[in-house]
Amino acid sequence: MMVLPSSDRKYRRSPPRSPLLPQKLDDDQSFDAHGSGFDGASTSGAVFNLSTTIVGAGIMGLPAAVNQLGLIPGLLTIMFVSMLTESSIDMILRFSRASKSKTYSGVATDAFGGAGSNILQACIVINNLGMLVVYMIIIGDVLSGTSVDGFHHGGVIEEWFGQHWWTTRSALLLFTTFFVFAPLISFKRVGKSKF
C-alpha cells in the first residue's frame, strides 16, 4: 500500500467536485454524466437559460427603474450596475483559474471563505425571490388586468372568459404558483428547464 504525502492526503479526503460544464472529450469517448454529478446540461442550454433570464428581467425591470428614478439617475444606475457586473465576472474568472474547484460554490468559497460563500448564497436567494415577485406582478397584470385611477385594464383571461372568481388576480396567481412555478422549481437539475 502506497502512503501519500500529507499534502496529497488532504485533497484525497475532500469530497468529489463536479464541473459546471462537461469537458470536451474525443469523439470515441462519452462523458460520464451520472458519475460526475452532471446530468445532461450543455453549454448552449446554459446560455439559453441565462439569456432568457437576462432578457426577460431586463425588458421588464429596466423601463420601470428608469421611470421611477428619472432619465439621468436611471442611466447612471444602469452604468453603475454594469461596472459591478463586469467586476464580478472578472473576479469569477480570476478565481476560477486559480481554484482547484470547478463549481460555482467552490469558487465562491475559495474567493470569500465560508462566511462569504454563505452571504453569496443568501444574496442569490434574495435575488431569486425579488425576480419571482417581479414575474408574479407581470403575470397578474397580463392575465387578470389592473386598475389605475379608477379605470380597469382587462387582462387576457378576463377578456376571454369575463369576470368570474377564477379570473381574479389572486386566483390566477395561486393557480400559476402551484401549476407553473412549483413544477419548474422542483427540477433537481436546472438544465432541464431549458425545454
Image (spheres, rainbow, N blue to C red):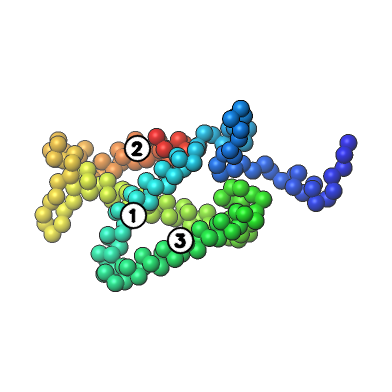
| Residues marked 1 and 3 touching at CB (< 8 Å) | no
The residue sitting at the top extreme is 28
| Kind of residue sitting beneath label 1 | Gly
Q: Residue at x 18, y 51 (%)?
A: 146
Q: Judge whether 38 appears above or below 81 on screen.
A: above
Which is in the foreground here, disc 1 or disc 2?
1
Name which quarter of the figure residue 192 lies in: top left
Residue 67 at what x, y percent from top left? 25, 64
In the picture, the quarter occupied by the C terminus is top left
Residue 17 at what x, y percent from top left? 64, 43
Residue under pointer 3:
85
In the picture, the quarter occupied by the N terminus is top right
Judged left or right of residue 27, residue 13 is: right
Q: Residue at x 14, y 35 (%)?
A: 161
Q: Residue at x 14, y 50 (%)?
A: 153
| Kind of residue sitting beneath label 3 | Thr
| Kind of residue sitting beneath label 2 | Val
Residue under pointer 1:
58
Which is in the foreground here, disc 3 or disc 2?
3
Judged left or right of residue 91, residue 70 is: left
Circle 2 SS class? helix
Task: Return the disc, 1 or 2, that comes first in the chain's sequence.
Answer: 1
Q: How many marks?
A: 3
